Amino acid sequence: MLISGAVLLALVASAFGGKMSLSISENVILTNMMSLPKDESWLEGRAMLVAVGENTCKSVFSCADCNTARLCRPSADGSFVPLRDVKCPASAPFCNGATGTCGQQPDATCGQADNFVCLQDGHFPDVECHSYHVCEGLVSHKFDCVISGEVYDAEAKKCVPSDQCAKFTCGAQGTKAASDRFPGYFAYCDLDETGKVAPLVIDQCQGINTLNTTSQLCEPICQKEGVLEDTEDCTKYYKCHYLWVDETTKFMVRERMDCPANTAFLPSDYVCVNMDQYPECKAKKHL
Ligand SMILES: *[C@@H]1O[C@H](CO)[C@@H](O)[C@H](O)[C@H]1NC(C)=O
């Protein structure tokens, strides 16, 4: 069948008619549902995958990012060096990582290297509040919130309308800095390539714990009297109890306690048990 250029353009225009972001998300759902991490913002067309996998210039035709093809030149040592970047046209907006050419199908392996370090699987905010990372099998996928006025909400794990941009403000080199809006998330601060102390690696406290920037530990918030797991050290636990100042005034206080020698705090039972009954802790403590 012969299709004239004008007809083809009209077809493409109708395929991408209406809201562009919605069309992209529909396409992504159809073609890549199995190969991409499940992510609400992205499924709703509020976020776009911008980087995943290794950096490119693997062959003459490569991708610079998910929407830009990159022409590379072979060098004497057999590697390839970037020559020119070509933005994919609206009619074929996605760069395919395998062929390095623009096409109509979004590609799960497209794009730049996401140099985000996955310390565990899950969703993590980027230091830049319009971006976030989804780690699956310790492979990071970087997403950008694409709707103007939306930023990433680390608690809701999606892009939401907000004028508050979450930040990690680093103190000294080698310390952890909590996110100012989502204190369950924190950054390891170290020197960046310009020699400035910066939030380099993002991690998350376990459970409902939050980073206490003074103690530099992920600590629980006492909601009632009792004992709580210490996610940083399995031979310790936290005890929450009220301190009565007088007959009507009380404060909740939290104490970090040590289990007796050769015992460990078993979170499922809320008691210190013999180390042999908690092999994971024994292994962690190299006993
Ligand atoms: C944070 O840690 C410091 C030092 O251990 C402690 O005195 C303080 O009570 C902790 N803050 C909270 C909110 O738990």
Image (cartoon, grey):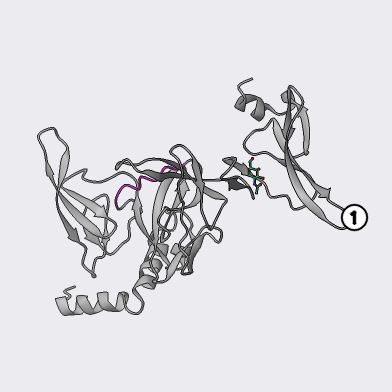
- Marks counted in the figure total 1
**Percent x, y for residue 106?**
32, 60
Quick check: 281 above or below 99? Answer: above
Magenta span dominant secondary structure: loop
Q: Can you tell which quarter of the image residue 143 is in? A: bottom left
Which amino acid type is shown beneath numbered disc 1? Glu
Residue at 44% of width from left, 42% of height from top? 189
Q: Can you tell which quarter of the image residue 215 is in? A: top right
**135 displayed left or right of 110:** right
Q: Residue furthest front?
A: 246
Q: Can you tell which quarter of the image residue 130 is in? A: bottom left
| Magenta-drawn segment | 111-118
Residue at 44% of width from left, 63% of height from top? 42
Residue at 19% of width from left, 73% of height from top? 1
Q: Which one is nearer the viewer's eye here, 100 or 234?
A: 234
**127 displayed left or right of 184:** left
Quick check: 193 above or below 234? Answer: below
Q: Which one is nearer the viewer's eye here, 12 or 132?
A: 132
Q: Residues within 10 Å of mark 1 (few under 14, many from 20)?
A: few
Residue at 24% of width from left, 70% of height from top? 90
Residue 4 visible at all: no
**Percent x, y for residue 156?**
55, 61
Q: Which one is nearer the viewer's eye here, 206 or 199?
A: 199
